[in-house]
Amino acid sequence: MAAGPGPGCFIPGFIIVGAGQGGLQVAESLRAEGYDGPVTLIGAEPVAPYHRPPLSKAVLAGEMEEAQLAIRGPGFWERQRIDLLTGVRVAGIDRVARRVRLEDGRSLDYRGLALATGARLRPLPVPGHDLDGVLGLRTLDDARRLRAALDHARRVVVIGGGFIGLEVAAAARKRGLDVTILEAADRLLARSATPLLADFHADLHRAQGVAVELGAAVAALEGQDGRLVAVRTADGRRWPADLVVVGIGIIPDTALAEGCGLACDGGVLVDDGARTSDPAIVAVGDCTARRVLDGGSPLRLESVQNAVEQGKSAAAALLGRERPFVAAPWFWSDQYDVKLQIVGLSAGHDRAVVRGSVAERRFSVFYFRNGMLIAIDSVNRPADHLTGRKLLDRKIPLTPEQAIDDGFPLASLAR
């Protein structure tokens, strides 16, 4: 698919590698910033940019059709004069010549380059990982295969108790399937949520009839005639299955960045303006790790908001302008009738208070460090989440006593 300047245009413009949410945002923001020259968006998948979060939620549950996933309509590319190349992979980057080399042999010169290469699924390092009936979920093609497999499955084992694993488990259980979650850690959501939220989600899934097994490290997948039949854990237990979904995290796709010598550390290293170690190259989204001012480990955020905000910062940086990404990070997850919304980062909190009712599945947890609000987890309380984003972005003070008082008008502070 292509629209815009076309092959006859030889003026070096901006090239964006990766046609996900972040890459699209860079292209749109370049136009919004007033840039009128060539913009080329290159995507390895054979489809235009689409919304990824619904893949593990509404798409698997059969509540959304593929046509609804498109972020922009067909006429958008021509109107914005963005040259969209789909089903095209970049083989390498020549930073000296400012040129990208495509796998089909073509080369494209650039004035500035944006990397939005995303991430790939972390493989399951056990025997049997390549059996028929073992799937992961990252792309639209993955979702198609998984949805088709769910149509014929009876017993599903989800390996990994992170958000993707839990969302897939919920979608499978809503279909009436026998579902087991195997998590190697001693709680769910070990890398992304606090113990309170982990226990809440374990109870939520168990109440729906899902078997949640903690401390269950997978040792091998067993097959018969090349087809999955069971999962065996390190403690010797065996779980019959005709479908396994592996959700043990993702690995930033830094191959192109490393290949051309960009600084990487758990992702392509960027500053608050999405700049890499090369002034002509920016990077956005799941492939990145952001340098932090205190010299600690680079910060990795896997979210739509991160991709979008970095995309805006990256476009400004390519044009020599400053637009640092400073908003509080936020995320969300849908499971059954529960919507979890997270804003901020709760790591390092020294106090947490609950507003609302955990038993009624309608509550928020407010996290504080040294008396300052740093994060909020909201379950079926969207107003708390929206207000919390304003409080954190504007650094408006909130005390634990105010947060825990359900009668205190939080919204009045944000005005």
Image (cartoon, rainbow, N blue to C red):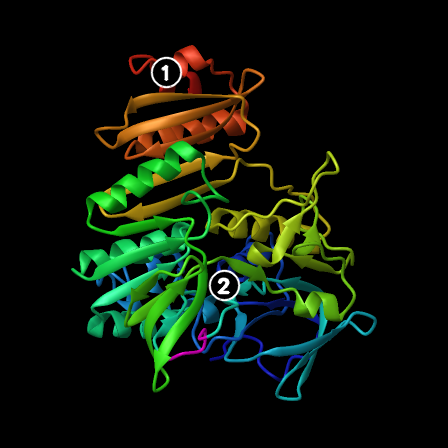
Residue 215 vertical position relative to residue 81 in the rendered view, above or below: above
Query: Can the viewer see residue 168?
Result: yes
Where residue 75 appears, as percent x and y from the top left, is: 40, 70
Residue 411 vertical position relative to residue 233 in the rendered view, above or below: above
Is disc 1 placed on a helix, strand or loop? helix
Where residue 229 appears, as percent x and y from the top left, is: 31, 74
Please tell me which residue is depicted at 32% across the width and 41% down the height of the picture: 201
- Look at mark 1 in the image and give the residue it sits on: 404
Please tell me which residue is depicted at 44% across the width and 43% down the height of the picture: 186
Q: Quadrant of the C terminus?
A: top left
Give the farthest residue toward the right. Answer: 96
Magenta stretch encompasses residue 409: no
Please tell me which residue is depicted at 33% across the width and 64% down the height of the picture: 238
Give the main secondary structure, helix, strand or loop, of the magenta stretch.
Answer: loop
Left or right, 189 with respect to 119, comes to left
Say which label, 2 or 1, has the lower sequence index.
2
Residue 61 vertical position relative to residue 341 in the rendered view, above or below: below
Q: Residues within 10 Å of mark 2 (few under 14, many from 20)?
A: many
Please tell me which residue is depicted at 69% across the width and 56% down the height of the picture: 318
Amino acid type, label 2: Gly
Range of residues picked out in magenta: 128-132
Amino acid type, label 1: Ile
Give the farthest residue toward the left. Answer: 176
Circles 2 and 1: CB atoms closer than 8 Å: no
Left or right, 368 with respect to 284, comes to left
- Look at mark 2 in the image and give the residue it sits on: 20
Q: Quadrant of residue 155?
A: bottom left
